[in-house]
Image: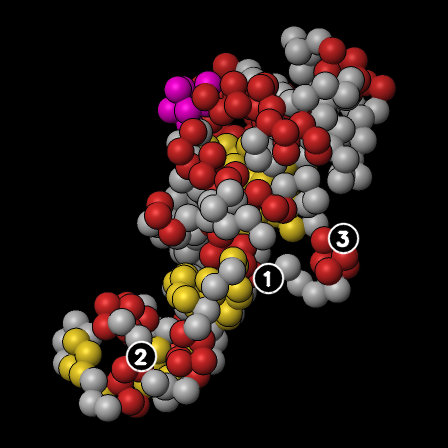
Amino acid sequence: MNVLVEKRAPAMDVRTLGLSGYVHRHKVADGVLALYHPFGHEVSFIPEALEEVLDQRRYEMIPPELLNDLIQRRFLVPEDFDRSALDHVSAPPIKGFFSLWLLMVQTCNMACRYCVVEADEQTRKVAQDPEKTNASTKMTPETADRAVEVFRQSLERHRQPFAKTTIYGGEPLLNRLTVAHVVPRLRQMRWEGQTQPLEILCFTNGLIYDPKITEIFVQNDVTVGLSLDGLQQHNDASRPLLNGGGSFDKIVSSLKRYRDAGVRVGLSCTIGKHNKDDLGEIAAFFADELGINTFQLQTRMHLVRETRRPASLARLVSLLVSPDPSMRWDSERHAQ
Ligand code: SF4
C-alpha cells in the first residue's frame, strides 16, 4: 500500500498514522460508530465495519474522502501526536477565584422532581402573585455587596485576566430586589490585571418574567440561562409547577421575550429517564424550533448509579454537536 494524503501543507504517508489514544468510540445505531476526540471536541460517524480496519491500519479499505477527514480532524495522528498535543492543550493552573456564584434565594417556585430545593410558605404566596418580588431566605443587597468586594479583592490579588459571576438560587428572580441591585455593581467592577469584561450569567427557571429586570440585563450585558428539559412532554414530566401543572409554555414564552428584548439566552437541560432516549430530537428542537445555539447538559448522579458507569460522553456528544444537520441524531431513523 502506498497512499499519500494531502493535509493542508505537506503530503504524508498514512502508514505512519494511527488512531489517537484519546479517541472515544461508541456504537450509536446499528452499523454506526461514533468517534469522539476531546481535543477540539471533534465527532465523526463511521460505518462500524471500519473499526477493525482502522485498528489494523488497512487504510486502503477506507474511502479517501473519509480518510482525509479523519486525518484533518486529528483522529488519525502520527505516533508522537498524543504527547505533544497534551503539552499544547494543558494550561497552567489558575490561582485564586475567578468564578463567583451568588445564591439569591434558597427556595423555588417550581417543583422539579429531581431537585432538593423546596418552596417554603412565603415562596408559595409569591408564586401565586407575580407582582410580589420577595421570597423568604433571601440574600440582602448588603450581603451581595460584600461578596462582590471580596471577589474583586481576590481577582486583583491574583491579577486574574478574566472572571465570571453566576446569579443563581433556588429561583433567583424571587429576589429581584437584590438582582437589580447587584447586576450594575458587577458590571462596574474593575480590578488590576483584568483583560476581559466580566461575564455575568443568570440561571432562571423562566416562570417569572419581569421587564424591568430584562432591561437591567440588557443594559449590563447579562446572559440568561433558562432550564428546559426538552419538548413539552419531557419538560413537563420533570419540571412541574407547584400546583402540578406544566411549565413548558411559560418557559418558552419567557425565552422568546428575553430574545425579543435583545438578551443572549442559552438553555440548560437536565438528563434523566424522562428525556435520555430523545436527546437528538431535543437538540434539533432547541436549534431549529427555538433558535438556540448554546445549551448545556446536566447529568444527574443517579443516572450514573443506574448504569454503573459514567454516561458515555462520546454518545452524548455524537448525538448533539454535529454541525452538519444530516449527521444529527434522528431518533426515529436510528431508533434502537
Ligand atoms: S427550578 Fe431549579 S431550583 Fe427550582 S425546583 Fe427546579 S431545579 Fe430546583
Q: Give how far apart the Cα atoms at labels 1 and 2 are.
A: 28 Å
Magenta stretch, residue numbers:
257-263
Residue 192 appearing in the image:
no
Tell me, what colour scheme is on the image?
Answer: secondary structure
Give the answer, above or below, for where 319 lies relative to 241.
below
Point 72% across, 19% down: residue: 245
Q: Position of residue 294 (x, y in %)?
A: 44, 42
User: Would residue 233 appear left or right of 53 to someone viewing this image?
Assistant: right
In terms of image quadrants, where is residue 304? bottom right
Q: Which residue is mark 3?
A: 302
Q: Give how far apart the Cα atoms at labels 3 and 2 are.
A: 42 Å
Tell me if mark 3 has few (under 14), some (14-19) or many (20+) residues whose alpha carbon lies within 10 angstroms of its own.
few
Q: Earlier in the sequence, mark 1 or mark 2?
A: 2
Q: Give the secondary structure at mark 3.
A: helix
Q: Position of residue 27 (x, y in %)?
A: 53, 64
Q: Which residue is mark 2?
A: 61
Residue type (three-letter) at the residue carrying disc 3: His
Disc 3, ligand 1: is the CB inside 8 Å?
no
In terms of image quadrants, where is residue 246? top right
Q: Which residue is mark 1?
A: 312
Q: Magenta span has 210?
A: no
